[in-house]
Image (spheres, rainbow, N blue to C red):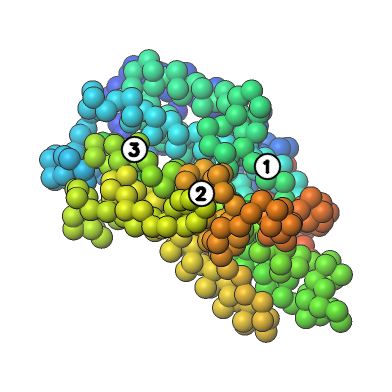
Amino acid sequence: MPINYDDRIPNNVDLSSNKRLQRALETWQPAFLDWWRDVGPVGTALDQIYLRTAISTEPGGWAHFDHVRMPDYRWGIFLEDQDHGRTIPCGDHTGEPVWQEVPGEYRSNLRRIIVTQADTEPASVEQQRWLGMTAPSLYDMRNLFQVNVEEGRHLWAMVYLLHAYFGKDGRDEADELLARRSGDPDKPRILDAFNQPCPDWLTFFCFTMFTDRDGKYQLGALAESGFDPLARTCRFMLTEEAHHLSVGELGVERVLRRSAQLTQLDPNGDARAQGGIDLPTVQKWINFWFCYSIDLFGSEISSNGADFFAMGLKGRWNEAKDYTDHKALDKYYALPVVKNGSLTEENVPLRNAMNEVLRQSYITDCGRVVKRWNTALEQEGSDFRVSLPNSRFFRRQGVYADNNFNREGELIGSEAWERNRDAWLPSAADRAYVASLMHPVTEPGKIAHWIAEPRRGINGQDVAFEYVRKG
Ligand SMILES: [Fe+2]
Ligand SMILES: [Fe+2]
């Protein structure tokens, strides 16, 4: 179904044929715009941003780029086309036709899954709202705003599901999504990483690299859902998410390249003395955001994870394509756990280890990016190599949260943890230093000193193109 841009809410779900739903969403729309005005990107309402808008959900449907004011961005509801023969890919209902309506017995679980995912979308916009003021270039500023408008659209995608399939409860949840605030002590966002501040661009790049990538894996798991409208929604969101991940990956890579250059430029090998970010500091940011992001997968041993899989609400990454046994019964996952003060392996029923299975797929994906970063460092003539910490390091959720581990994943005492903490994670002084470098660069083609130029521009445009026109 083509995208209809004539309706007040652009959509490819034939919204105008369901007047009640259309009216309900049209009532929610001004509340969304108020939210965007109140906590979206600061001071940008009149700026013209070079943004892409989906014109169809087919591959290549992203062809449309234009300068638009963000409040005029056409947030809408886009689902991938229905695959009519699709069956439930996993769990106890494997092989049965997918559900087009919410199965009554799974209603509250499904609502919880959707609300938890939905809550992250506006949260990240709130976290990033000040960053436009210190963008290192117009190119970067544009990428930030592209990510922001698309997270707003992801919120729309999830709110559509709540309104269309969950009645009054769903409408109440949709209102709550605009009421919670990232970092607010009284009304925080649901997940911890989404209440962390995002005060500088190194954080933004790590966030889009690691935390948006968690989003990719959660959406991937939900794209395998037996509830077909959710699966189709998530499949289209994944196409938008790919850009966010590249903003993060390439952003960190450009910081690493510049850091390596400045390190070599300085007689004492001190990138900070040259006004840059030193490589060990970048590694600390990687440690912090990698660990916060792997917490988002939930506990290593989880009965909820088992239930969601058994019910066919959530699959593994590429469940239908990469796995042959979709029931995962009578199988075990060997998980290292702490027992009597040391690490031993425990055999966990595979269904209870589904969070961990998804987390490991994610970690493998992160590892591929780290390899590319190290190739970039090598190209710059640097001996420094970045790495991911072990997944037990610095955890606040799951079976490792009560113990301390070093970066290699070895059990250590609390004294050793305290002694090394500032060497492993951003210290207050590191944060203050990185913050001190954040000054806006708003001349087309110019770039902040602490980051390398991008290799290429957006949509075939020059790097020096005027990606943002101040209003
Ligand atoms: Fe998103
Ligand atoms: Fe994203």
In the picture shown, does residue 140 fall above or below 150? below
Tell me residue 393's x, y (percent).
57, 56
Q: Residue at x 73, y 37 (%)?
A: 43
> Nearer the viewer's eye, disc 3 or disc 1?
3
On the picture, is 209 further left or further right than 306? right
**Can the viewer see residue 345 in this picture?**
yes
Mark 1, other Cα within 10 Å: few <14 / some 14–19 / many ≥20: some
Alpha carbon distance from label 1 to label 2: 24 Å
Q: Residues within 10 Å of mark 2 (few under 14, many from 20)?
A: many
Q: Which picture quadrant has residue 388?
A: bottom right
The quadrant in which residue 41 appears is top right
Which label sits on residue 132?
none
Q: Does 456 sit above or below residue 403?
A: below
Give the labeled residue for mark 3: 303
Q: Amino acid at mark 3?
A: Ser
Secondary element under disc 1, as helix, strand or loop, is: loop
- Look at mark 2 in the image and give the residue it sits on: 400
